[in-house]
Each structure stands twice: as structure tokens, then as C-alpha cells.
Amino acid sequence: MFRQADPVVVETPAGAVRGLRDGSGERFRALPYAAAPTGAGRFAPPAPHPGWSGVRDGTRPSPTAPQPARDFGRLDMAPYFGPGWAPGEEYLTVDVHTPAVDGGRRPVMVFVHGGGFVTGSNRAALYDGGAFARDGVVLVTVNYRLGIPGFLDLAGAPANRGLLDVLAALGWVRDTIATFGGDPENVTVFGQSAGATLVGALLATPEAAGLFRRAIVQSGSGTGAFTPEQARRVTAAAAAALGVEPTAEAFAPVPDERFLAILPALAGLDLRTRTAMDPLAGLSPFSLVLPVQPADGLADGPARDVDLLIGTNTQEGHLYLVPQGALESTTEADVLDLAGRVHADPETALAARRAARPDETPGELRSAVLGQALFEAGTVRMAQAHARISGGRTYVYSFGYGSTALDGRLGAAHTVELPFVFDIADKPWLHGDNRLLGPAPAPAGLAPRVHGAWVAFAGTGNPGWAPYTPQRLAVEILGA
């Protein structure tokens, strides 16, 4: 038996790296998949990493992308956001958690974190890969550019640089993961929230062909991209706040600290246009920028040949209201204001919801509108589009377990499924009235069931229930 945290060294194409071996397998941290994005390079495509000589230390976490602090009121979201900005140039990195570096060919799962395109990292405690390694999966977690460097649309710079980073990381997996006991021909890319929206975009990206066999979209959206017109509004506001021209050349000398300082000036922009509503309901000024929504462009990418597992939580919108006390304080005017951001005909949309659920409070209605606009509508559209072209390779779930946090009000909110996917729902730091899962223990068997479905899907393409087809709209209920 190995001692706790024994060192282990492997030789990768870029150079030798030292990780740690313990009871859950072998872990390697801060492995660069691209060169550090500095100066003007922050607005360029990811460049190949030059490699290194000697043995690189892979036992400590990497820096993280520049990002602002996030506050979710009474709810402790530190396990989701991680340490925030840990400054350092080389943050385009992955962590690898593998059962063993032994020449095996195991299923590989590549996780793309969420955070509204402005926050998050693979250092978040929720993304512990121990259970995946225990169950024979090589887990890779990815950092990518965020905010202005990652997603602001600028003349002279490629669009969607954060998405290009994820593509580069998948290229690294293809070329390197066999070193860590993984099978480069059996890769599942999965993500949550903004990360799930990025995964959905990969399905419609021609350059992603051949990089993965399966995809999992957790609480993302196939319709979450900004149009070029919407993106231009954000770019104009950012340039005005900085006092520079809206070009990559003008932005290149601006320090990251200044980019973070102007983010409040971008909050609340009206992104409604003649042809589009705000797909993020005002919650983030950054998203993918595409002429066609991913759900409508699947024929352009590898989606036809990729197995898809996709779903949402039943009370997604609660995360944005309950911790701030807004579920109780919401007024009818608040509901109408939100509906006006996300629906071309808000009165009709609200009337239909009220007719279906006449007992909902204004706060519950606001939460439902948020969840539908941010996640549910785009998830349904992508599931239906994929089912039409994939021939029985689409699987849909609905996660319904309600967290008992915040006096039992948090419910099946956005992010609540993550501890079950990673099979860490019993961790004490997730429990307590202001913790993600609340004071009650997680239901026995739910985490093994959810995590087991994800592992089965990665291994075989089938999570254990009937596929979603145009003829049979099968949805698996998890934790209702």
C-alpha cells in the first residue's frame, strides 16, 4: 500500500512532471496546455506551450484567470468559486486525477467549470476528482480565459477566446492523456452553467470534430450566445469605461486590474435588440458571441457523432433570489421587469405561467422565469435538435433534489447537482444552513446514482435510462 501522498514522476510530450499518489489515485496539477496569455497575447488565440526542462512541480495548484469576487448573500459559495483570482501568468492549465499512470486506456472526462463567463477555476473544492479516479475514470479539469480577455468581442482579436482555450485543452488531452492512463479515443467533455454552454458550443464547432466522443451539458443553454449586435454594445461600454478604442491593440496595454475595475460599469446593460432578447437576463455582460445559436448550428459541428447527456435542475432560478432574500421581497413589478428582458411578449408569457401555476408567489414566478430563460428553454432546444440528428444518442435528465439550505428555501437551485455528480455530497463543508446542501444529510444513494450515471455514460454512452427521441421525449428524474 502506498503512503499518503507519495511522489510520482511521469514524462509527458512537454517534459517531465511530478505529481502525488495517494489512496484515490495519482494527481497532477497546473499542467499547461497553452502558453501564458500576457499583454497582447491575452487577445490572441492560445499559443503552444514551449515545454520545459527538468522535472516540473505538478503538486501545487496553478494561478487562476483574473476575476472579480462574487457574493451570493447568505449562501457560502466558496466551494463553487474557489479562491477567486490567484494572480500569476501561467493559468491556462489543467489538473489531472487518474487511477494510475500505468499505460491503461481508461475513459477520460474533461470538466469545464461555470461562473458566468467571469469567475471560477478548476481549484474549486466541488471539482474533486477522487470519486472519478476511484471508479476508473481519468478526470481532467480546465482553466480558461474569463471576462474581457476571454469573451469581449474586439476588432483585431478572434472571438470567443475562452472557447478557443477549451479547444486547445482538448487538443492537449488528445496528445497527452495516454501518458496518464487515459484513452484519447474515449473522451467525454462536460461542463456546468457557463461551462455547459461552452460544451454545447463545441457541438456546433467544426474544429472540435474528433476531440471528444461524448458531451454532458449540466444547466447550460443551447441558446445562451450573444448576437454580434449585442456584443458590440458590451464592447462599446467597456471601451468607454476604459477611455480607449474598441480594438485589441488599444486594450493590449491595459492591466488586468483595470479590466476588473470597470466590470460594474458593464452590469445591467440593456442587450435587447430588434431580433434578440438578453439570453443571460442581465446576469453577465459576457457570453459566447455567435451569429447562430449553438442549438441551431449542430449540423456545422461534430454533434451528429457525439452522445449527449443534458439536463437542468427544477428550481434553477432560486440561486439568484433566495440567498439575497429576494424570493420573499420580489414584487409584481420585478417579475414584469425580468420578463421584459427575456420575452418579446412578457405579458403573454407571464399569463401562461400563471394559468399553469396560479398559486405561485411573485418570487416563485420570478425564479421560474429566470430558470426558463437562462437554462431550461435552451436545454430543451438543444436536446430536441440533437435528438433529430443523432439517432438515439440523446439522454435528458431533470435534477429535483432540494437543498435544505437557508431555512429550507434554496431547493433544487442552480449548482445543487454538482456534489452529487462528483460524489462528494457527504462532505461536512457542504452542510449547514448557509452551505450549499443545507443542514440535512444528502439522501442515501442519490450521489452514487447520479455519479454512477455520469461514469456509465462516459464509458458506454448510456447513463442507464431510455434515450430522448423525437418520438419519445424521455426525461429521467433524479432526486425528485
Image (cartoon, rainbow, N blue to C red):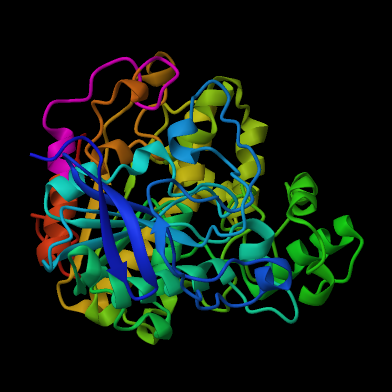
- What residue is rendered at 57% in x and 47% in y? 119
Q: Position of residue 386 (x, y in %)?
A: 29, 73
Q: Position of residue 63 (x, y in %)?
A: 55, 50
- What residue do we see at 59% from left, 46% from top? 339
In the figure, is residue 474 to the left or right of 147? left
Q: Is residue 354 visible?
A: no
User: Which secondary structure is most common in the magenta stretch?
Assistant: loop
Q: Is residue 462 left or right of residue 323?
A: left
In this view, the residue in front, 134 or 167, is 134
Q: Quadrant of the N terminus?
A: top left
Quarter of the image where one finds residue 106: bottom left
Residue in the picture at 32% in, 15% down: 439
Image quadrant where residue 45 sits: bottom right
Tell me, yes or no, whether the highlighted magenta stretch contains residue 443: yes
Residue 358 shows up from this direction = yes
Q: Is residue 248 magenta?
A: no
Question: Is residue 48 left or right of 103 when viewed as pictured?
Answer: right
Q: Which region is colored magenta? A: 432-451
